[in-house]
Image (spheres, rainbow, N blue to C red):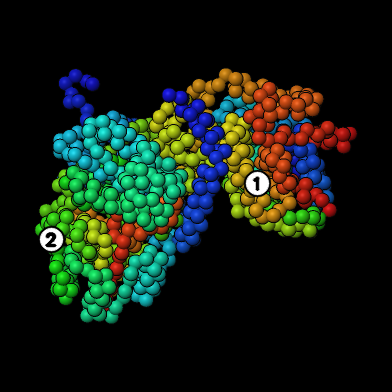
Amino acid sequence: MSSPVSQFKTDATAKAGDLRHRGLIQTALRKYEIVRDVRKGAFQDWEQARQSAAETKFFAINHLDTHLVEFAEKLEARGTKVHWASTASQAREIIGGIIKQKQAKSVVKSKAMTAEEIHLNPALEKLGFEVVESDLGEYIVQLREEAPYHIVFPAMHLTRAEISDLFHNKLGSPETHSPEELTMIARDALREKYITADIGITGANFAIAETGMISVTENEGNARLSAALPKTMISLLGIEKVLPKLEDLALFLPMLATAGAGQQITCYNTMYGGPRQADECDGPEEYHVVLLDNRRTELLADPEQRDALHCIRCGACLNVCPIFRNVGGHTYGTTYSGPIGSVITPHLRGLQDWKHLSNSSSLCGACTETCPVKIDLHHHLLHNRRNASAGKPSVLERLAYRIYAIAVNTPGFWGLGKRIGRLAYPFARFFSGTIYDPARAWTKTRDLPPMPGQSFKEWWKERNR
Amino acid sequence: MVEGTEPMSERERILGRIREALKGRAPLPGHHGEVVENFAGPERETFSQWLPAVGNTKKAKFEAFAKASADLKTDFRHVADEATMIRELRSVAKEEGWIKVASHHTDLTDMACGKLGLPTLWTDGGYDVNEMESCDVGISVCDALVAQTGTIVLTSRTGGGRALSVLPPHHVVLAHSKQMVRDLPAAFALLKERFGDGFPSMMTLITGPSRTGDIERILVLGAHGPKKLTVLCHD
Amino acid sequence: MKVTLFVPCFMDACYPKVGISIVEILERLGHEIECPEEVVCCGQPAFNSGYWEESRVICRKVLKQLERAEAVVIPSGSCGAMLKVFYPELFKGEPEEAAANDLAARTWEFSDFLVKRLGVTDLGAKFEGKATFHDGCHGLRELKTKDSPRRLLEKVEGLELVEMEAAETCCGFGGTFSAKFPMISTAMGEVKCSSANETGADWMVSNDSSCLMHLQGLLDRQGNPLKTIHLAEVLAQR
Ligand code: SF4
């Protein structure tokens, strides 16, 4: 297998030049920007809302221990079994164990990025269980045997023609280019699964400490069905999902919907606090909540970047990121893509192996500007770069910067450098863009900047002589 | 591990790591990198002031709910009295050609389903899922309507369980105009007040019929939940 | 007022006309100008690449050289952001922290200096053509200089200013990023140029020569007739 950095570079180069991909993504995201702006405009004060949301998450995360204990105890009081997993493999074992113990055959799952993070589906399939993704986009990428393209829009890289082909091949459905008909094909295929599934697995968007409930945001109703029909329900969530109070949802639900999809509020926002209670007519007999650390506590231990744990996975930073828009989600080679992925992946999966994600940014700051919980995303990319080169500097690069520092700090050197540049310039044109060109990374697609005969400083000196 | 002590649980390990991590203090967002001592948490009373504006008169609230419903493609009908509501319900039943309905027992639903005169699956006390799947509509009451967003609030205890409002292809909500609250903060305050000493296992905010945009970001209604949502509200 | 002009390294070597234009404009407004010989680079390349120690070597010298300057003017949003926003971060907890904060407060991006510090927008400039403005990201988001360049351009006789849809979208330069990830950088530049082309503009104006260096290189290579020009050069024409 290629290293993460070479995989990234290869895929990024291919995708960046793929005009079809570019057209598809730019069009989809331009549409998003228009509706998002309308929804943002409806807020009385979006900026203040961001500040309040950031402060709420700040409070939640900076008292994470007490919030988690409260959350778990309240859930347990209503008959929920709460599991704690330090690592991905522990979480997989816990979930696999529950399913085994229930002697379940089929599992319906609604969208959960945390499950992607721990590679839950392959693990369960290895144990012999059928796991069906029920969110339409997730279902599509599952049928294609690929990872979600985007944390909120998993199948946004596909055209309806491709989806039609896929359904035709895998489900034997007639070909159609109507999104409506394609959706109904999936609806019918999945209905059966809900009714027969023994286990429903969901993620969570929020964990309310005060009341001991998770909150799940969705448009389709698939999570609600997964939480209503199977006898056993399991929710997997990262420990950072906490919100202190129930009424915090009043702010977070519309902000998540606005930032994430340009909706005022998502179609279903559902809070689950336990299995079926004595006075209730349906719902699972057993409810399990699995709390996952998986190196989140390491991120927590870095006060500078702790706010990355405020993330509500709305996807807004991906949507506005010009890197994401040009290389696409799969190129990142990891569960969380886009700016937030580039910030946290080096923490979750190893700084030296994943620092290229922090390097592959122009630091434009569009992500930070859009983030509903005000995570200082692009500055954290800088922090990761600093930490990476402090931990394991590239000898050549450091040497280059040392020489450069001397050159610019010594006026004679700088003047000489310019003169050499000027002399070399006419020759540079001969092999500009060829493989012999030391500046090929630049000149392959771009002409060199001009090199006029007199620099500004030379002009200034001459003028003041 | 120190000899003689119990092995640490994963819970304690995680909490231990969290407590250790939190010894370093993080800067408060929006305060230019400054660590603020004793930050007491957000001022939640202000949330309403940032969210989309809704007037506080009955008229303003109903207008906001109607507008949101139109955007969402919720069929919202505000009628003068209970009798008119029943007439509306019967006309929807006729239009849609309902053969069988699902509902739960409350005074209002008992009366409404009685007037419909169709075979009815009652969810109270348990039901067969396949039978519910074959129903044309789920009829329920709700806990509140939220003017700001066109949202219906209901719970597993008060709305006929978890599936009634999401499994049949059409969900009809019967409501009283007194149930209209202004905004989301008011809706959560109401839930806390009503259930504070014993929450149901599920509480949901339903905003429009089920939808997806997963295919080329084009809106399609009825992804997995109901394709239609009708709200009948009487004074 | 005595103005200390900081013409960043690559502008000194490749785009002397920008500095010359600023000297002309500020002198016309009656200000005295100095250009310290030993201030060459703001230290951003090393900083952005994570080599903060190496960057500090350069920045310390800048701090020293500009210690007594009344107002430092930089014709680049990016280098301006380095002095105003990143020096304080770079020197946080270092002996030079106070000096860095102090310099940040005395430093101005060129268009902001004219509009917000001097309060001038009409420079009596004349420039024929249709132009669209590219917001360099550092100027736009770190320094919030969205309005100043536009207010200046609105007053230029003969110039028609049209906004492009992607005005605030990054051009893809990003310093060393442009060489480390050339294909992503190029794709981003293409998106930018096609948005500028959609407006029918003849000129893409910006207050950041680094963005323009990348964009002009791309336009030239692709034979795209759109031309780039620094704001100062437009404002100096009469
Ligand atoms: S970092 Fe911010 S914008 Fe990005 S997904 Fe998380 S919450 Fe959304």
Residue linked to disc 2: B124
Residue at (39, 41) in percent of width and height: A148
Q: Label 1 amino acid?
A: Cys
User: Looking at the image, can residue B26 be seen?
Assistant: no
Return the residue nearer the eye: A356 or A301: A356
* Disc 1: host chain: C
Residue at (14, 68) in percent of width and height: B119
So how many labels did they put on this image? 2
Dot 1 and dot 2 within a common chain:
no
Residue C193 marker: 1
Is disc 2 placed on a helix, strand or loop? loop
Is disc 1 placed on a helix, strand or loop? helix
Q: Residues within 10 Å of mark 1 (few under 14, many from 20)?
A: many
* Disc 2: host chain: B
Q: Is residue B25 left or right of residue A67?
A: right
Image location (x, y in percent) of residue C48? 58, 33
Image location (x, y in percent) of residue C146? 63, 52
Q: Label 2 amino acid?
A: Asp
Q: Residue furthest right?
A: A465
Return the residue nearer the eye: C162 or A327: A327
Residue at (25, 44) in percent of width and height: A108
Residue at (30, 35) in percent of width and height: A120
Q: Is residue B24 left or right of residue B106?
A: right
Discs 1, 2 touching: Cβ within 8 Å? no
Image location (x, y in percent) of residue B149? 37, 63
Vertical position of residue A121 compared to residue C164: above or below: above
